Amino acid sequence: MRLGKLLEWIFPPKCLFCAERRAVNEDGLCADCAALPTERVFRYFNIKDRRRAYTLECRATKRYKGPFCNTLHRFKFQNEAYLAKPLAKQMALAIKRDQTYDCITAVPVSRERLKERGYDQSVLLAEALSEYTGIPYRALLTKTKHNRTQHFLPSNEREKNVHGAYAAQDCTGMRVLLVDDILTTGVTAKECARVLYRAGAADVSMVCCALSL
C-alpha cells in the first residue's frame, strides 16, 4: 500500500458538507451527503444609487449553518485552499441555467489581508468556477482600504465599514457574476454590486458557497 493511500485510510478526508472523516467521492462528499438532493437558497437585495434602483440576486447551494461552517472556516482561515475546487463545483449548481454572463469576478480582500492570509479565498473560488463553467474570470474589483473584518461588527456598523472600500474597472455593458465565500448581512455584496453598476455593468448577480438566512 502506497504511503498516500495508507495515510488516507488512517486519516480519511473530511466530507465537504458534514465535516466528518469518512470516505469521500470525487466531489469531496461522503455517501450520505452525496445522496442528498441539491439545495438551492436565494436572497434578494435592493440597491439604490444615483436615482437608479437595482435588485441583486444572491444564490448558493447551502445555508451558512451546521458542520458546513467548519468547512468554510478551514478554507478561509486554516490554509486549506485546495477546498476552492470542490466548493466551486457546488457553487456551479446554483447558477441560473437560463442566464448568460460575460465574466466572473470576486469580492477581493485588501493587500494587508492577502499578505496576512497568503491567498484570497474569493479569487480562488472565482477562478475555479471559471474553469468549471467556461465563463471568463476578470479581476474587476479592488479593495481600496483595509477596513475592519465584517464578521466581528454589529449589523448597524457594517454598512459604514464597507462604504468606499471597493473600486471597479470599466465594465460597460457587461453581465457580471460576482463571487464570494459567505454572505451574511449582504452589506459587502451590495457595495460591490453598486460600484460595478457605477462602472457600467449591465447586470450583476451573485453566487456564494453559503448564505445566512
Image (spheres, rainbow, N blue to C red):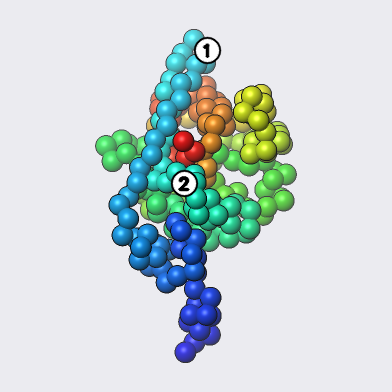
Checking the image for residue 50, the label placed there is 1
Residue located 32% across and 39% down the image:
96
Left or right: where does residue 75 sit relative to residue 56? right
Q: Position of residue 135 (x, y in %)?
A: 39, 45
Please state which of the two labelled residues, at mark 1 or mark 2, is closer to the viewer.
2
Residue type at numbered disc 2: Cys
The residue that disc 2 covers is 209
Residue 187 image offset from top left, x and y in percent:
56, 29
Please state if 77 lies on the left or on the right of 123 as rendered: right
Q: Quadrant of residue 34?
A: bottom left
Residue closest to the eye, 171 or 155: 155
- Few, some or many residues within 10 Å of mark 1 (<14, 14–19, 20+): few
Q: Nearer the viewer, residue 157 or 197?
A: 157
Relative to 116, residue 143 above or below: above
Query: For the residue labelled by badge 1, is the local secondary structure a helix, a strand or a loop?
Result: loop
Instruction: Give the SS element for disc 2.
Output: strand
- Evaluate if marks 1 and 2 touch, with contact meaning CB atoms under 8 Å apart: no
- Viewer-nearest residue: 19 or 177: 19
Residue 90 relative to residue 117: left or right: left
Residue 94, horizontal then vertical, whole percent: 36, 44
Q: CA distance from mark 1 to mark 2?
A: 31 Å
